[in-house]
Amino acid sequence: MKEMQTDQHAIAINQPIPEHTTEKLPSALTFFLPTRKRRAVLDALAGFSNDRTQAILIALGLIDTE
């Protein structure tokens, strides 16, 4: 078996330092619907709240209504 030699011109690439606060940042939740179903979902969510994020959380029972 042939040993690999280190390239003297190679540059060491360090891994980025992990963020310690990323869990507090918002993350996107994306899915695709046909136009009619999208409109139906948005109309249904509007009955819970004007804020789509709040509306979906309320509709799923993850938070109480305001």
Image (spheres, helix red, strand yellow):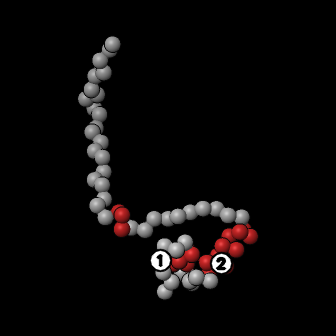
Q: Is label 2 in a helix, a strand or a loop? A: helix
| Residue 53 shows in the view | no
Upstream in sequence: badge 1 or badge 2:
2
User: Is residue 8 left or right of 45 when viewed as pictured?
Assistant: left
Label disc, if present, on residue 63 of the rendered structure? 1
In-front residue for pair 63/50: 63
* Residue type pointed to by label 2: Ala
Labels 1, 2: front one: 1
Q: Quadrant of residue 4?
A: top left
Image point 71% across, 69% down: which residue? Answer: 37
Q: Quadrant of the N terminus?
A: top left
Q: Quadrant of residue 2?
A: top left
Q: Is label 1 in a helix, a strand or a loop? A: loop
The x and y percentages for residue 52 are: 55, 77
The x and y percentages for residue 57 are: 51, 74
The x and y percentages for residue 66 are: 49, 86
Placement of 26 over or under 52, stated as above or below: above
Count residues near mark 1 (Cα–Cα under 10 Å), then give few for <14, some for 14-19, many for 20+: few
Label disc, if present, on residue 44 of the rendered structure? 2
Placement of 61 over or under 7, stated as above or below: below
* Residue type pointed to by label 1: Ile
Outermost residue toward the bottom in this view: 66
Image point 31% across, 64% down: which residue? Answer: 21
User: Is residue 33 left or right of 11 when viewed as pictured?
Assistant: right
Report, in whole angstroms, how far the alpha carbon at label 1 lies from the one at label 2: 17 Å
| Residue 13 shows in the view | yes
